């Protein structure tokens, strides 16, 4: 298995299992099968609402000897309603209790979008807190404290723009070691990749298959279907593999981690086997030409009337 190496020498399996949209009642079995197939990296988050069931599956696999804790790489994420230095450790402790773990390998600030404490998903603009009132640096101080207490081995962020990474780097004691963002051939983010490589920060690609199972509220009618892209399909035919495997091989070959979600044994196996593929330079160049800067998870949810956020200020780019 390909790995990404952190500054202290720790290694993260580059291909992990995504668990966003994996429903309770199904996710535990998916994690069990994934561990049996050889997955060692599981990507979780408090807001996915399924960590308790994942925790049961992890505990069962550890008890059965399928894996040892040191072989596993478990990532989770701080939800938006727990920004603020004092709120990070309690939120992480709840996540550890749900996952039945003593420590996480990686803990991320899920979004640079603070919400009020009693809000899960915002319903009105009044549910938000501006970054002026709740600075990211203050939340980062809580992340550093969690790491210092040994509750997580590594800390990072998710959905941060290059500008927000730079702002955080300027004030952070411990530098963020990971940014997890949407990355696939329709959203290649070359400047982000270059910036992270120069800064010694790792990148994880979420929604690598285009997240076609997103809730309807996060979809639009005419969106392009990544898995049906004719050029991806043509490359897949040349390798006698599936389009999904080409998308995953591309992500790995760019040096990023990648976390495809599946709850289906056949597709879990197929996705893991993508790590064995090597794309030619010509194939990488063809895929390079497919970039549309097209976000499937575009952040519109954070820009409702009355919110302090706009798409421009969220991504620090023109909408
Ligand atoms: P399922 O869970 O039934 O396998 P993303 O990782 O970009 O969020 O995409 C997840 C979506 O892609 C889910 O609908 C998942 O369905 C589907 N999926 C996962 N692996 C594959 C695959 N190898 N081929 C086709 N679809 C896949």
Image (cartoon, helix red, strand yellow):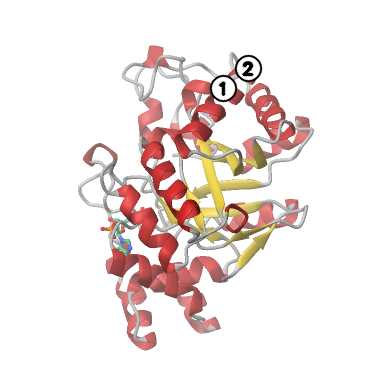
Q: Is residue 177 visible?
A: yes
Question: Nearest the camera: 311 or 112?
Answer: 112
For disc 2, the neighbor class at 10 Å (few under 14, some 14 to 19, many from 20) is some
Label 2 CB less than 8 angstroms from ligand 1: no
Residue at the image position 36 percent from the left and 31 percent from the top: 301
Label 1 CB less than 8 angstroms from ligand 1: no
Location of residue 10 in the rendering, given as x and y in whole percent from the top left corner = 71, 56
Q: Which residue is mark 1?
A: 90
With respect to residue 141, does 237 lie above or below? below
| Residue contact at pointers 1 and 2, CB within 8 angstroms | yes
Location of residue 157 in the rendering, given as x and y in whole percent from the top left corner = 59, 39
Quadrant, the N terminus: bottom right
SS for dot 1: helix
Question: Nearest the camera: 30 or 256?
Answer: 30
For disc 1, the neighbor class at 10 Å (few under 14, some 14 to 19, many from 20) is few
Q: Which residue is mark 2?
A: 86
With respect to residue 148, does 65 lie above or below? below
Residue at the image position 36 percent from the left and 48 percent from the top: 296
Q: Is residue 48 left or right of residue 225?
A: right
Q: Is residue 159 visible?
A: no
SS for dot 2: helix
Whole-angstrom CA distance, mark 1 to mark 2, is 8 Å
């Amino acid at each position: 298995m390909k790995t990404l190496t952190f500054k202290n020498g720790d290694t993260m399996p580059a291909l992990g299992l995504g668990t966003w949209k994996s429903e309770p009642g199904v996710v535990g079995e998916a994690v069990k099968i994934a561990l049996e197939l050889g997955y060692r990296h599981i990507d979780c988050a408090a807001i996915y609402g399924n960590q308790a069931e994942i925790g049961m599956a992890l505990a069962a696999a550890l008890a059965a000897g399928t894996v040892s804790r040191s072989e596993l790489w478990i990532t989770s994420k701080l939800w938006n309603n727990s920004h603020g230095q004092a709120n990070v450790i309690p939120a992480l402790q709840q996540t550890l209790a749900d996952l039945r773990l003593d420590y996480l390998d990686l803990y991320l600030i899920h979004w640079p979008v603070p919400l009020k404490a009693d809000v899960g998903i915002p319903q009105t603009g009044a549910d938000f807190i501006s970054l002026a009132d709740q600075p990211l640096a203050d939340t980062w101080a809580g992340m550093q404290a969690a790491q210092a207490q040994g509750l997580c081995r590594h800390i990072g962020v998710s959905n941060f723009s290059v500008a927000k990474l730079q702002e955080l780097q300027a004030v952070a004691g411990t530098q963020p070691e990971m940014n997890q963002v949407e990355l696939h051939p329709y959203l290649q983010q070359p400047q982000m990749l270059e910036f992270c490589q120069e800064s010694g920060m790792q990148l994880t690609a979420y929604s690598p298959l285009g997240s076609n199972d997103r809730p309807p509220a996060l979809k639009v009618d005419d969106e392009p279907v990544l898995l049906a892209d004719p050029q991806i399909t043509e490359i897949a035919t040349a390798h006698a593999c599936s389009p999904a495997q080409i998308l995953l091989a591309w992500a790995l070959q760019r040096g990023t981690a990648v976390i495809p979600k599946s709850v289906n044994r056949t597709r879990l196996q197929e996705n893991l086997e993508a790590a064995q593929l090597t794309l030619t330079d010509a194939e990488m160049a063809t895929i390079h030409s497919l970039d549309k800067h097209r976000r499937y998870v575009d952040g519109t949810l954070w820009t409702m009337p009355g919110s302090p956020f706009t798409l421009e200020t969220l991504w620090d780019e023109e909408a």
